[in-house]
Amino acid sequence: MSFTFIITIFLIGFVGSFLSGMMGIGGAIVKYPMLLFIPALLGFEAFSSHDVSGITAVEVFFASLSGVFAYRKSNLILKPLVLYMGISVLIGSVIGGAGSSLLSEATVNIVYGVLAVLAAVMMFIPQKGLDNIPVEEIAFNKWIATGTALLVGLAAGIVGAGGAFILVPIMLVVLKIPTRVTIATSLAITLLSSIGSASGKLFTGQVPYEPALVMIIASVLAAPLGVKVSRKVNTKVLQGILAVLIMGSAVKIWWDIF
């Protein structure tokens, strides 16, 4: 790899992982298109879709791990919610991945696209007084948390995409979790859900090791910085940025469908 190519990959990983730590999402929805198009636009050899999915799967694990590590002393990670939603997403993604052959690709993509649009719409529903709830007083419906996470996991597993950007509005709007707690907890859930996809890509030889290593180094540096910025930014601003990212994700999914 040339020095310019390494810098390009590093910057892509840095930007995506910074957003990951700041927003509580895996960041693949940002890194995937950047990896797919930017190197080719700059005259480097283009990555294939398999290469990009392999790199992002492994890198998202490390970005989430770095973000969770940065939050470890903050008391913002709601561990019971991580347990219920994390395990459900894992189970759903395994079942979805295994059963993907039973549904047509078009059907699956439409289901995932509908979920993405619902997630985007939910981000624009006003949340009053939510961020004033002390962490120790947060309560949530365990059945709704488990059921929605399972549904998202099923769709994500079938499509082969991440579902963190859909889980975030569910946590904010449906489960009524405060913004900063949602961001920290979502990173922990993403960490759990990324274990399966990263392992699968590694064991099947779908990961180009050198670019992946550059992205991992960028993620370890950038995700904790995103966490620090997230703590200082007004929660309304964070929700606005999240809404834009999720809306962009929904548009991208439907663009791919059509």
Image (tube, rainbow, N blue to C red):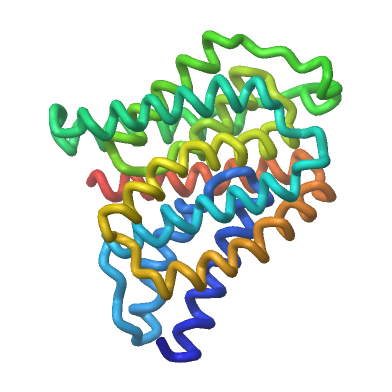
- Residue 40 higher or lower than 160, as above or below: below
> Which of the 4 quarters of the picture holds residue 138?
top right
- Identify whether 211 is placed above or below 205: below
Where's residue 137, x and y in %? Answer: 82, 15
Residue 175: which quarter of the image?
Answer: top right
On the image, the x and y values in percent for residue 184 come to: 69, 38
Q: Quadrant of the N terminus?
A: bottom left
Q: Nearer the viewer, residue 200 or 177?
A: 200
> In the image shown, does 153 or 94 lie closer to the viewer?
94
Q: Tell me what residue is drawn at x 31 percent, y 64 percent.
A: 51
Residue in the image at 43% along x and 73% along y: 211
Q: Does residue 12 appear left or right of residue 157 in this picture?
A: right
**133 left or right of 144?**
right
Total marks drawn? 0
Residue 133, x across and y down, in percent: 83, 21
Q: In this view, which residue lies farthest toward the front? A: 203
- Could you tell me residue 164's position as x and y percent? 51, 38
Q: Residue at x 82, y 41 (%)?
A: 73
Q: Nearer the viewer, residue 37 or 87?
A: 87
Q: Residue at x 81, y 33 (%)?
A: 75
- Which one is in front, 215 or 161? 215
The answer to which quarter of the image holds residue 140 is: top right
